[in-house]
Amino acid sequence: MWLTLFLLFKKELKTVLLSTSFRPVKKLNESPFFALITGNYSARTALMSALVGAWNIFYTCYLIFMSVRYSSDWYGSLAGFYAMLVLMYAGIIITEATLRKRGVFRR
């Protein structure tokens, strides 16, 4: 039922959600944080890298626990893979901060 309603009124929903008079969209557009994220590619990249990196750190710790708990090579190899992802995300954040200090990125 909900899918049918969505498919029937998809254009109307899009119009309402994208209109500037729709209150949540209006509040978002007035937010300086939202303007920073939507208008600044480097800030958006750093924020998303930090969020994904934090999740990967949590998930890596979980996989390490599972590997030790069940003496599983499978969980150990997954933990190693996610640890490499954490290092990559840390590299992105550190590189972005270093380049920002050098003045490569505009604010």
Image: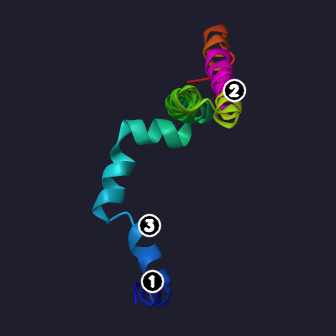
Residue type of the residue flagged with mark 1:
Phe
Mark 2 lies on residue: 80
Q: Magenta part of the protein: which range?
A: 81-95
Asked which secondary structure carries label 3, the reply is: helix
Q: Main secondary structure of the magenta part?
A: helix
Q: Is residue 71 magenta?
A: no
Distance, label 2 to label 3, CA atoms, is 43 Å
Res. 18 mark: 3
Where the C terminus falls, by quadrant? Answer: top right
Left or right for 48, reference 26:
right
Distance, label 3 to label 1, CA atoms, is 16 Å
Callout in the foreground (2, 3): 2
Callout in the foreground (3, 1): 1
Mark 1 lies on residue: 6
Question: 105 above or below 25?
Answer: above
Tally the marks: 3
Asked which secondary structure carries label 2, the reply is: helix
